[in-house]
Amino acid sequence: MNLNQTTTIPSGKGIQRKWFVVDASGQTLGRLASHAASVLAGKLNPLYTPYIDMGDHVIVVNAEKIHVTGMKAENKLYRRYTGFLGGLREESFTKLLARRPEKIVEEAIKGMLPKGKLGRQMATKLKVYKGADHPHHAQQPVALEVRG
């Protein structure tokens, strides 16, 4: 019987962050976003601590080939406010997908991260690209499989 059991509490210093690449082709938006958010938050790390950013970097490619279920493609609206009176702007999912598909994936993933300073820090490790190419080949990202 070992009586010298200790609990390891990570400090957040010296974290070895990995790089993962996710192909969004044919993926469901919500499933991809929840999986990417858990990687960004560090929940796959055995030393996960809720108040420390332990997450890895995530690169999402082929954002224009994302898929949504049900009637979301016709009914979903993205709202933003310009800051001026009457400045509420609405854009449908299909129009935003044609204009800026990275924004759809980015908003879905960021919405699943914690709110506040820690969540914003986690979101800086997210990179979303429209096509199959990305400029992060030097980091040697590993393909991340999203099931569902």
Image: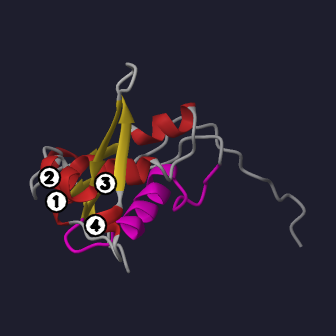
Judged from the image, the secondary structure of the residue bearing numbered disc 1 is: helix
* Location of residue 79 in the rendering, given as x and y in whole percent from the top left corner: 37, 42
Image point 10% across, 59% down: which residue?
132
* Location of residue 27 in the rendering, given as x and y in whole percent from the top left corner: 28, 72
Judged from the image, the secondary structure of the residue bearing numbered disc 2 is: loop
Kind of residue indicated by mark 3 = Val
The answer to which of marks 3 and 2 sits earlier in the sequence is 3
Give the CA distance from mark 4 to mark 3: 14 Å
Which contiguous range is marked in magenta?
24-49
Kind of residue indicated by mark 4 = Ala
Disc 2 to disc 1: CB gap under 8 Å: yes
Q: Would you call the spot at circle 4 few (<14 residues within 10 Å), some (14-19), or many (20 or more)? A: some
Judged from the image, the secondary structure of the residue bearing numbered disc 3 is: helix
The answer to which of marks 3 and 1 sits earlier in the sequence is 1
Label of residue 73 in the image = 4
In the figure, is residue 47 to the left or right of 107? right
Label of residue 64 in the image = 1
Query: Is 25 in the magenta?
Result: yes
Kind of residue indicated by mark 2 = Lys
